[in-house]
Amino acid sequence: MNEYDSNRIYDLTSTIGFKKTDIKSEANCFVLNTCHIRKKAAEKVYDEVGRIKKSFRSLKKPLIIIAGCVAQAESEEMIKREPYIDIVIGPQSYHKITDLILSYERKNKKIIETEFDVVKKFDELEKVYNSENKVSSYLTIQEGCDKFCHFCVVPYTRGPEYSRPFKQIINEAEKLVKNGTKEIILLGQNVNAYNSFENGKNYKLSSLIKRINEIQNLKRIRFTTSHPKDMTEDLIECYKICNKLMPFLHLPIQSGSNKILKSMNRKHNKEYYISIIEKLKDINQNIKISSDFIVGYPGELEKDFIETIDLIKKIGFINSYSFIFSPRPGTPASEKKLNNLQISEQRLKKMQDLLESLQYKNNKNYQNKICKVLIENKLNNQEKYFGRTENMTPVILEADECKIGEIIDVEVNSFNKKNLFGLRKLNKERAA
Ligand code: SF4
């Protein structure tokens, strides 16, 4: 989501003459769009500001803007801790960035803007050209969260659930495709909680997918990140009826222990999660699943951890994110007694070894087979291209010539745990 927001921040600032530069010393403004999901991420922001400060010691001070969830959570504390920062702007107020920059330039006075103004934000963003022209583009459809998992800061930093109007999203999707996008990834903190009432009609994520599926020249649709509770029948049905919806789903479970899921306030249990996967597999055996896991959540015993390991083996996730529990200030879980760090580290290692072996096994299954790859870009100075399979697996392939944005057949001849490697299969090219 930060990638989407960063691009929109650029679009906004370009209306007052700002341009991107790769030459750091030439920049007169830095916008750090931040994430607050883990403590380390917040500390990285201060480290980065420190590095900018150091490299500009003998140069004119650039304007320093901190955007995103760290800005929302730490607000004026940021300027107190690091006075080199000039503007702090939360994720639901970044549509005001140009006004804030101009105001700062006029008054030379530090600014903090952390209002939850999400409706206004998307109305304002709609007026500004979306310059995104990547083959695979993100499109935010929903923000915020009402679930309040006990470990998570999102409901506090992004605010309550908000769904953008259906027509606004379709317009943006059509513009992206006109700009050259071939794959749209619908985004939301709780993307499948999308729910918009307009003119007496109720639009859900399934309504959006069905409508976006009709856009000519668009080849692939994905969505992330979903909550198991909102994997409704109509959404599952989309995997059957929408040919552009890719057979891959990132569906975080966090733990395989019902006791821990309850303590996390996840509002689903392991059995329910498994039933969703079974329904998806009934539609398409080849659908692949990835997930998120928190290791060492307060109260996690060895038997809870083993239940998680068993679940991972049962589902066979193809890639997943796993972290040791990181207490975030202000969340209920941050008040609980921490687990022994050494034990958590051992468990994380065990889990990551298992997840990697499953990823390796998945990639091995592609060996000597042909898969459909959407070409996203050419690798620098090489006759090699980068793309992804329908299941999101990265592919590096050799070909004399490929068009960025086309879907081609690739014969996989080797692999490692992260990537597949192969050659374009010209004689077996299929219509994309
Ligand atoms: S559903 Fe996701 S975003 Fe919402 S509180 Fe839970 S982890 Fe955070």
Image (cartoon, rainbow, N blue to C red):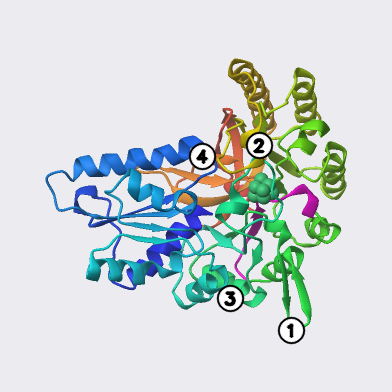
Is residue 246 visible to us here?
A: yes
Q: Residue at x 66, y 40 (%)?
A: 332
Q: What is the distance, in whole Å, between disc 4 and disc 1 at their CAs?
A: 47 Å
The disc at residue 396 is 4
- Contact (Cβ within 8 Å) of mark 4 with mark 1: no
Observer-side mark, 3 or 1, equals 1
Residue assigned mark 1:
199
Amino acid on which the number 3 mark rests in the picture: Asn
Observer-side mark, 4 or 1, equals 1
In the foreground, 390 or 385 = 390
Query: Can you give x and y, in whole percent of width and height, for residue 347 in the image?
Result: 66, 20
Q: What is the distance, in whole Å, between disc 2 and disc 1 at their CAs?
A: 41 Å
| Structural crowding at the residue carrying mark 4, measured as other residues with C-alpha within 10 Å and reported as few (<14), some (14–19) or many (≥20) | many
> Which residue of the protein is positioned furthest toward the bottom in this rendering?
199
Q: Which residues are magenta?
A: 216-230
Amino acid on which the number 1 mark rests in the picture: Asn
Residue 221 highlighted magenta (yes or no): yes
Indicate the secondary structure of the residue bearing disc 4: strand
The disc at residue 171 is 3
Query: Can you give x and y, in whole percent of width and height, for residue 80 in the image?
Result: 34, 47
In the foreground, 410 or 145 = 145
In this rendering, the answer to whether 1 lies above or below 46 is below
